[in-house]
Amino acid sequence: MKKNHYIELITNIKNHIKADKFEEAYKLISEELSMPYIPMETEKELKELLIDINKNLDIDSSFKTIPLDKIIDFIIDESTNLEAKDGLVALLNNFNLNDNLDEIDVILSSPKVELFVKSQIIEALAKQNIDQKVDITYGIQSFEVNPVEIMKHANEFNTKTVDKLSNILKENELELTVANEMLRIVSISSVILNELEVDYSLALALLSAKATNNEKLLNEIEIEETEIHETEKKIKQIQKLIDK
């Protein structure tokens, strides 16, 4: 296929995105990624455009979806940032994951994929009621978890902690959204690592304030002198859960 085809394709997709025609752009990307051969540079650019579209479009099964092997490749790719992986994991819901557990195992067993992302995968499996053990790798450790059981415990943990988190964040709705989303995934990661009793509410509130550069909220959060060291320790735990 001639080089100018790919140049024209990328230009068309970008024009659709500029015109807020995200569905058309998504379909073009999906069709191209389904082809048996794509130049490496073009595939990289398509991935970046897909990530851009994911911020603006709720993808559901009515769309021609990106091939599963491409989604997995993009998630495992170390150059793909966490925000992008979040959107890519959402695309997995378009597949019957029970029929594709071998492919999902590639993500869960990869040392390149963060536990934060693996926790999102566990959540996706639980939503499809996959009530059986799957292997997951964290660092040099490998162990089995049942997605449905993990989510039961994570939801209990999340319910207890979110009330404290809401009180700390008061009426800062944006920050609550940021922290609550982080809490949801951290709670799954915590259960996987058997840290269910750890209260992350204060640490998550601080991370949320920092993530949104909210000086006012940072000043409003009161930390007892005796809690400073413990809170800093929990922030590091959260960042480790996200980064590893």
Image (cartoon, helix red, strand yellow):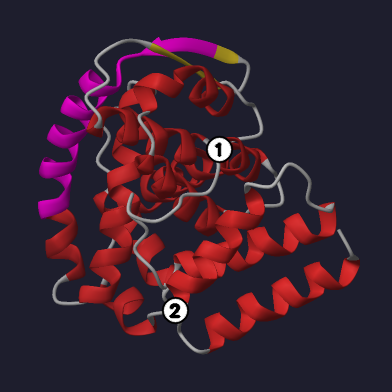
Instruction: State the image coordinates of residue 89 (x, y, percent, origin top left).
Output: 45, 45
Q: Assign the magenta stretch its main secondary structure.
A: helix
Q: Is residue 73 depicted above or below 62 in this figure? A: above
Instruction: State the image coordinates of residue 162 (x, y, percent, origin top left).
Output: 16, 51
Q: Is residue 142 in sight in this rendering?
A: yes
Q: From the viewer's perspective, tell me whether residue 87 is left or right of residue 70.
A: left
Q: Is residue 190 depicted above or below 56 in this figure? A: above
Image quadrant of residue 32?
Answer: bottom right
Q: From the viewer's perspective, tell me whether residue 220 is left or right of residue 36.
A: left
Point out the image quarter for the N terminus: bottom right
Query: Which residue: 45% across, 19% down?
Result: 101
Of 177 and 44, nearer the camera is: 44
What type is the residue that disc 1 sits on?
Glu
Point out the image quarter for the C terminus: top right
Label 2: which residue? 213
Query: Which residue: 40% across, 20% down?
Result: 99
- Residue 145 lies in the magenta-colored region: yes
Label 2 Cα crowd, 10 Å radius (few <14 / some 14-19 / many 20+): few
What kind of element bears circle 1? loop
Query: Which residue: 39% across, 56% down?
Result: 63
Of 228 and 36, nearer the camera is: 36
Label number found at residue 24: none
Of 209 and 29, nearer the camera is: 29
Q: Is residue 102 depicted above or below 75 in this figure? A: above
Magenta span of residues: 142-163
What kind of element bears circle 2? loop
Residue lying at the far right of the rendered structure: 3
What type is the residue that disc 2 sits on?
Asn
Label 1: which residue? 114
Label 1 Cα crowd, 10 Å radius (few <14 / some 14-19 / many 20+): many
